Image (cartoon, rainbow, N blue to C red):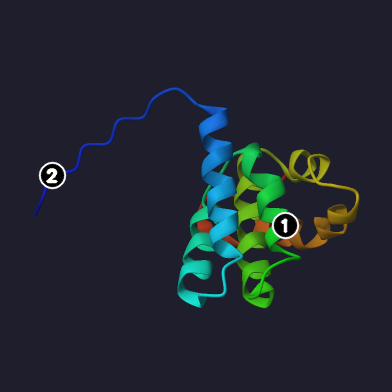
Amino acid sequence: SQQLTLEVGERDEKRLENVCEGLTRAAMLKNAETALDAAKSLSYVEDVVAIPYLARLTRQGPFVVVTKYIALQGLGRVARVLSVETVVSRLSTEDRKLEPEIRAAAWQPSSGTQNPH
């Protein structure tokens, strides 16, 4: 086995935005493996910064049928951490229709602690 050291520093919102933007661009590629890996990675960003990027994946991209599901799981994770109301309040008017699906994803037991508020 190998030893892995991970240092967690202060939250850097600009860096996080850049990472989310890069993952979103990658999720829009026509290479299925790259696109789906990027969407899945983005879905694990449990921060308000990720919300608009995840929402975009629910409606755009060559693999939107799959990325929508992945993005909703990510929005559900963020909702468990922050609350469904916080997530929905940060969505565009167009994306607020996702609230029932976000609420359902927040209640899914597969991802650990539930706090859907």
- Between 86 and 95, the one lying in front of the other is 95
What residue lies at 73% left-to-right and 66% top-to-bottom?
60
What residue lies at 21% left-to-right and 37% top-to-bottom?
5
Instruction: Name the amino acid type tagged 2.
Output: Gln
Seen in the picture, residue 73 relative to 50 is either above or below; the reply is below
Q: Position of residue 100 (x, y in %)?
A: 82, 60
Label number found at residue 114: none
Q: Which residue is mark 1?
A: 56
Instruction: Name the amino acid type tagged 1.
Output: Arg
Q: Residues within 10 Å of mark 1 (few under 14, many from 20)?
A: some
Q: Position of residue 12 (x, y in %)?
A: 51, 27
Q: Position of residue 80 (x, y in %)?
A: 63, 46
What residue lies at 72% left-to-right and 47% top-to-bottom?
52
Label number found at residue 3: 2
What residue lies at 19% left-to-right and 43% top-to-bottom?
4
Q: Residues within 10 Å of mark 2 (few under 14, many from 20)?
A: few
